[in-house]
Image: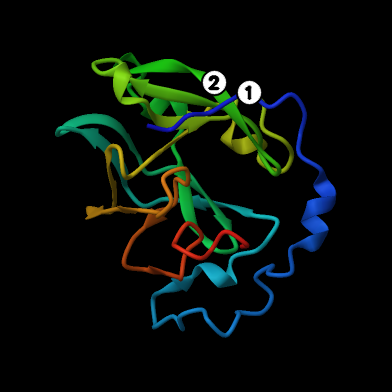
């Protein structure tokens, strides 16, 4: 189960200056993408926000939680993208807001959501009530953990990003290695 705690203030942004992998040059350990693939090492840091029109679906035990073809992907160096689904395309009656929050240096404070039917299972999604610029377009949108619910992109079942905390969506088009795998703590 993911345990999150409130953060009183944003982390020291001077840490950003220490990050030297910014998507401008793929490191030697990165896999080379084949045609039709994307390397997470070509994604930028700071992250980018990209509109996506593919059909994105989220289910729990076959029950549809969300379905949309007007999502946003947030793409950041070293991580698989996360898909953000508009609130009108999410059945919020199936979800319950959970206690706790976390803070992203780029997007701001995140709220967490669990399944109404089994809140004891912990968070399955997160959202940003007041995202920081330039991520204002995902205000109220939800992203889901593909390791906790069934997530699909154009019918392909998404694989979860390693590491438990991270919520990246791995499909056949995305290659790594990915943040969250053993030995990646310094990324």
Residue beneath the point at 22% across and 53% down: 155
Q: Position of residue 144 (x, y in %)?
A: 39, 37
* 10 Å crowding of disc 2: few (<14), some (14-19), many (20+): some
The Cα–Cα distance between marks 2 and 1, rounded to whole angstroms, is 6 Å
Residue 71 image-quadrant placement = top left
- Residue at x 63% of width, y 23% of height: 6
Circle 1 SS class? loop
Q: Is residue 94 left or right of residue 186?
A: left
Residues tagged 2 and 1 counted as in contact (Cβ below 8 A) = yes
Q: SS for tag 2?
A: strand
Which residue is at 31% across, 19% downward?
120
Q: Is residue 68 left or right of residue 73?
A: left
| Residue farthest toward the left in the current orientation of the protein | 62
In the rendered view, tell whether residue 150 sits above or below residue 91: below
Residue furthest out toward the front: 183
Tag of residue 6: 1
**Residue beneath disc 2:** 100
Residue 37's x, y, as percent? Answer: 41, 74
Q: Nearer the viewer, residue 67 or 183?
A: 183
């Amino acid at each position: 189960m993911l345990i999150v705690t409130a953060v009183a203030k944003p982390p020291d942004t001077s840490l950003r200056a220490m990050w030297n992998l910014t998507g401008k040059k793929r490191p030697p350990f990165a896999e080379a993408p084949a045609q039709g693939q994307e390397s997470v090492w070509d994604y930028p840091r700071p992250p980018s926000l990209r509109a996506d029109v593919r059909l994105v679906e989220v289910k729990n035990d076959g029950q549809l939680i969300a379905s949309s073809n007007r999502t946003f992907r947030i793409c950041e160096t070293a991580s698989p993208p996360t898909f953000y689904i508009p609130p009108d395309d999410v059945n919020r009656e199936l979800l319950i807001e959970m206690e706790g929050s976390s803070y992203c240096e780029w997007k701001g404070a995140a709220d967490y959501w669990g399944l109404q039917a089994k809140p004891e299972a912990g968070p399955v999604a997160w959202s940003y009530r007041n995202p920081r610029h330039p991520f204002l377009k995902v205000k109220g949108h939800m992203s889901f953990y593909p390791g906790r619910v069934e997530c699909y992109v154009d019918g392909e079942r998404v694989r979860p990003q390693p590491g438990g905390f991270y919520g990246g969506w791995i499909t056949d088009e995305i290659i790594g290695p990915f943040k969250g795998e053993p030995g990646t703590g310094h990324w």
